[in-house]
């Protein structure tokens, strides 16, 4: 029957109906945000991942494993449930279970990014959180988390990061010898938060060249 309808449409309109892209709005925004993150050098090669929750559902869309965030398309993203079952697409990123867990416990989070940006990853690799040295960074970095090194995809890594995000204040978690997790209420806030983390890491690094970076505190 479907074939007959398609044939009818081709005869009438000269083209076959295009298959409906489910959650197109969110997939398009995810691809666009990933590209912007890549342009800002928050990711390198195929490392890192990004996801967005589909509001009002128990689903999220995440980068498939092995692809560069600068060049995502509909074939390089995976739709999953918050229980980490794949609904559509290829094998998801190794850190996808962390994304699913965070969405489950944090109703205020609508988008998540895991980046290997050089300055913030350098602080994490040294076993240090990025200090909130500017007044703009206090809200984001005054309270954040850090986990020691665990292999990618290990239960220890998944559990440690998930546990830290049970604290509703925490938006940033540093991963020793690896990178950083950042969350936001949506993809726009996520990009803003990620840029803030990396830029503050850079400023704090420059301050070390001058002297000892001091944390900023409002009076
Ligand atoms: Zn990573």
Image (cartoon, grey):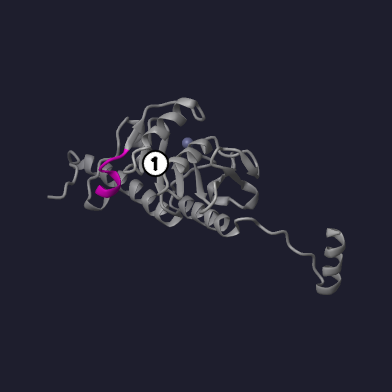
Q: Quadrant of the N terminus?
A: bottom right
At 60% from the left edge and 46% from the top edge, which residue is drawn? Answer: 79
Q: Is residue 76 above or below residue 28?
A: above
Q: Which residues are magenta?
A: 138-144
Residue 158 percent location from the top left of the image: 46, 31
Q: Nearer the viewer, residue 14 or 127?
A: 14
Residue 182 within the magenta-colored segment of the rendering: no
Q: Residue furthest front?
A: 56
**Which residue lies under the disc numbered 1?**
118
Q: Nearer the viewer, residue 187 or 102?
A: 102
Q: Residue furthest bottom?
A: 12
Residue 73 percent location from the top left of the image: 61, 52
Left/right placement of residue 196 relative to residue 80 reads left
Could you tell me how many numbered marks the image carries? 1
At 18% from the left edge and 38% from the top edge, which residue is drawn? Answer: 212
Q: Nearer the viewer, residue 191 or 16?
A: 16
Rendered image quadrant of residue 20? bottom right
Rendered image quadrant of residue 192? bottom left
At 35% from the left edge and 46% from the top edge, which residue is drawn? Answer: 198
Q: Residues within 10 Å of mark 1 (few under 14, many from 20)?
A: some
Left/right placement of residue 85 relative to residue 191 reads right
Residue 147 percent location from the top left of the image: 37, 30
Residue 151 percent location from the top left of the image: 48, 26
Left/right placement of residue 211 relative to residue 71 reads left
Rendered image quadrant of residue 105? top left
Q: Secondary structure at mark 1?
A: helix
Q: Nearer the viewer, residue 191 or 17?
A: 17
């Amino acid at each position: 029957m479907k074939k007959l309808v398609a044939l009818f449409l081709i005869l009438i309109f000269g083209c076959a109906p295009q298959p409906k892209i489910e959650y197109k709005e969110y997939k398009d925004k995810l691809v666009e945000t990933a590209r912007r993150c890549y342009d800002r050098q928050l990711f390198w090669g195929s490392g890192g991942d990004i996801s967005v929750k589909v509001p009002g559902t128990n689903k999220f869309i995440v980068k498939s494993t092995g692809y560069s965030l600068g060049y995502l398309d509909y074939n390089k993203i995976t739709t999953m449930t918050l229980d980490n079952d794949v609904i559509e697409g290829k094998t998801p990123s190794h850190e996808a279970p962390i994304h699913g867990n965070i969405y489950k416990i944090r109703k205020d989070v609508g988008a998540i990014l895991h980046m290997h940006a050089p300055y913030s990853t350098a602080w994490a690799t040294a076993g240090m959180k990025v200090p909130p040295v500017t007044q703009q960074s206090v809200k984001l970095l005054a309270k954040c988390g850090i986990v020691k090194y665990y292999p990618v995809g290990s239960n220890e890594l998944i559990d440690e990061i998930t546990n830290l995000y049970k604290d509703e204040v925490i938006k940033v978690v540093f991963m020793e010898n690896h990178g950083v997790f950042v969350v936001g209420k949506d993809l726009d806030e996520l990009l803003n938060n990620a840029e803030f983390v990396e830029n503050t890491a850079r400023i704090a690094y420059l301050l070390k060249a001058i002297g000892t970076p001091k944390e900023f505190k409002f009076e």
